[in-house]
Image (cartoon, rainbow, N blue to C red):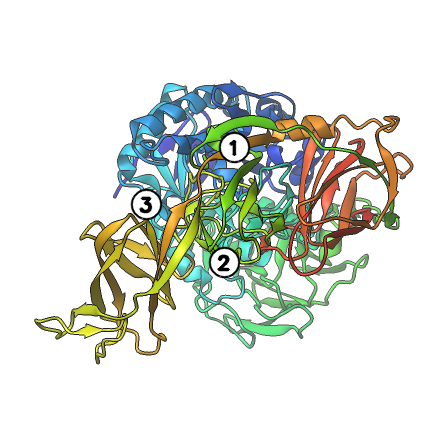
Amino acid sequence: MSRPTALSSGVELDARGIRIEGTERVVLCASLFYFRLPREQWRARLEQVRDSGYTCVDVYLPWNFHELAPGRWSFEGRRDVAAFLDLAQETGLYVIARPGPYICSEWDGGALPAWLGLDPDLRVRQHESRFLAQVTAWFDQVLPLLAERQYPANGPVIMVQLENELDFFDCEDRAGYLTALRDQALSHGITVPLIACSGQGDIEGATGDVPGVIPACNFYPDDDSPDIEPEVRRYAQVLADRDLPLLITETNRRHRTLRRLLASGASLIAPYLQSSGWNFGYTPSTGNWGDPGNFMSHGYDFGGYVSSTGAERPEYAQAQLLARVIDALGSRLALTGSSVPRVPVTADFPTSSSPSARDLDGGGQLIAVPHLGTAGAAPGTAVVNGVPVAVAPDSCPLMLTDVPLRPWGHDGTLTLASADLVAASEGVLTFSSEVPVTVVLGGNRVEIPAPAVGAPERVTVEGLTLVALAPGDAVRLRATERDGTVRLDDAAPLPNAAPAVEVRDVRRRPAGPREEPAGAHELPPALEALGVYRGRGAYRTTLDLTGVDELLLVGAADIVDLSVGGRVHPTIAGFGAAQRIDVREAGGRVGVEAVVEIWGHANFDDTRLPALRLGALRGLGSLWTVRDVTDVSALWAVHGHWAGLPAPVRGLGGWSSTRVGIPVTYRREIRSATASALHLRGVVEPVRVSVDDGEPRTVHREDPWVLLPAGTHRVSVTLPHHPSGGGLRAELLGLEPVTDWTCAVQNDDVLTRFAAEADPADPERYDIRLPLALEPGEEAWLDVDLSHLPPSDKGFAVRPAGTQIRVTGWAAGECLGRVWAGDRPAFSGGDSNILWIPPGWSGLTLLVRGTAGPGNPELRTLRLEYPDD
């Protein structure tokens, strides 16, 4: 379907690529997030991106980072996004702004404010009036900031992204929703291209095919896959048929892969996440990939070319090399599409199943030849148009074939160059390679030995000087003289890391901050209903457990420390899955307390667990006493396959059939004088359950429960016939609700204010020496003196060592993040065992909470490390 060319003052997109003020460009873009860095580091990080050779940064703007509570906005300090954009312009970088409203980004709730879930009629990410009214309030704040800073008049913003990977989400009216977002952007004066990215290749699902919304693609392939090129070329062609370029707004960080994407036709390449950062405070999300309930760590680092502390990794030099190739070819590369090589290419090493080649403007091709072998293996040999050439393992040289040399002052044709062209001027071509370089010029074939660092190789043929540099020299190349003399920038000094310091002496505060009463409630309310969007709350009641063996906790989210009769149970992080709690040791009338901490709201819509749905609320959920348990695995009537009437009666899942995988429905009546919970044990594949012929719901292995009101119900369970699945068992738990709760809260502001009150001279504080032993559920507030430590330009990593503790840290009046030592859920991101204190941030206050589990809670040591990675 044809789409009009996207135009703005200075930015033009069409099938030939990206033109910015008439100059054709291939844009390398690094993700860099102001909200994950201290403000004082913004300029240095932006300059670091610029010096990598990348010309652009993409930046999310998290809605709930700026709207702290309903109608309370902040764009100051670390939230001053306008200042960040102005710094990007001063640094000479373009910006792709991504204001959502949903951003994902492993950020609390995907940036959707937590209180949206309090309105049962509000439906997030839908063409729905209540949600769009909230979005309007956000866009009214943020879009004017972007409009004022659009390129080229007043700022660096060259594109604005609407939404994020909507094709992953079940949006009922994609066209209506994206149209509403587009119209709001236009009404605020956004004139640069509006883009929307697809997360799994569903272009219509991401854009609604709305005119004026440009499709972009996110690719996260296996770096070692031989099939990357044909997949990417397909999308390049699909978009070219709409007269649009291939914009890759997210992809892997490895430059071997990025080179393959470049050759496959990408005009924008934006690996996520090249410049790493930190999830400060209570901003990490939960529910990331794989196992449900995966936690995001304080460190936000996926191995990009700059670490969370700002250290440059080996990929940084790879970025500089790729940028030099793009600069050397300029518009000859930028205004071209992708195809396959015009000459035969074979290899004796693992490589692409279908290599890509970029047709160069003015003639010739750039061919990507990836060597998918691991680093350290022997170089391989590719044969390009009959000429054998060396290829280093774990590399992807961008080879030139049949390129006219007239633009560089030579009348001949470069028939083949087997290495990266990193600079070209009149009469001189400079290559980078760690293996010998083969150049075919006219009828002459030249073999240039592999250059050593500090020892360039030079050859003159047909009046043309050919220079080969080791990659370590190529990234420092300043100029190559006509005679082949190479001028390099000085090498950067190697960092010197100070030795780690172990801290054992700390000061303990006698008490923590007061709780704020939040009323009495018949049933436990959500924390958001109590005004807590980040932080924690306590739920308390008393309960007669005479004759009760277990409780059932339903809908609890997200971290729950439950104490019954003084016994603290292991931390519950089931995210809504029903939990059976053994209380046989309690007996009689006992106190019940649940402390619920919000680690973060789900950033991805995971239907397997209730609290991992996008927009799900946080809190205790509901607690029930279990009065009786009845096995109801037998006497299910079978419907399906050849089962006729009267319906056969079998055990649940017990029907035998030769049709494996075909759904079979089992039905029976279930009676209970009280509310009850049907527990399906042994669920492997998802099953469909309906009650009284109502709308079926899907029951998963992660949460195989169905709540039923008192009475008689006809329950239907539909599952695919699975003879090797092990069968199902069903039991019915008779329930009574636990009521009469009192609540108290501590939001993140309360906790942070208390942490900032550190006063070493306060006589109520007293010195202690680690290790510190705690009881499960006990807390300790500790102040740590860092004034004696030598300064560090990368700050300090604080590594608490211990068992069964959760540690929250504050410095300079801001919450750093949290660490969980001992029995805990899975974590993703960077090092999940450290807290980072940025350089110049003073003081350190820790809240240490003991948890139940294997071993006794104990904070053994605090190790302060000087990062150098």
> To which quarter of the image does residue 45 belong?
top right
> Which residue position holds label 2?
291
Q: Give the side of residue 755 with respect to residue 443, left or right.
A: right
User: How many other residues sit within 10 Å of disc 2, few (<14), some (14-19) or many (≥20)?
Assistant: few
Q: Is residue 524 above or below residue 559?
A: above
Task: Estimate the x, y position of residue 518 in percent, counting from the top left.
Answer: 53, 27
Q: Of the residues shown, which amino acid type is indicated by label 1?
A: Thr
> Which residue position holds label 3?
170
For the point 30% across and 74% down, the residue is 722
> Which residue position holds label 1?
742
Compute the Cα span from label 1 to label 3.
37 Å
For marks 2 and 3 on the same chain, the one whose residue lies earlier in the sequence: 3
Comparing 486 with 577, the one in front is 577
- Judging from the image, what secondary structure is the residue with disc 3 in? loop
Task: Estimate the x, y position of residue 664 in percent, counting from the top left.
Answer: 21, 68
Comparing 268 with 273, the one in front is 273
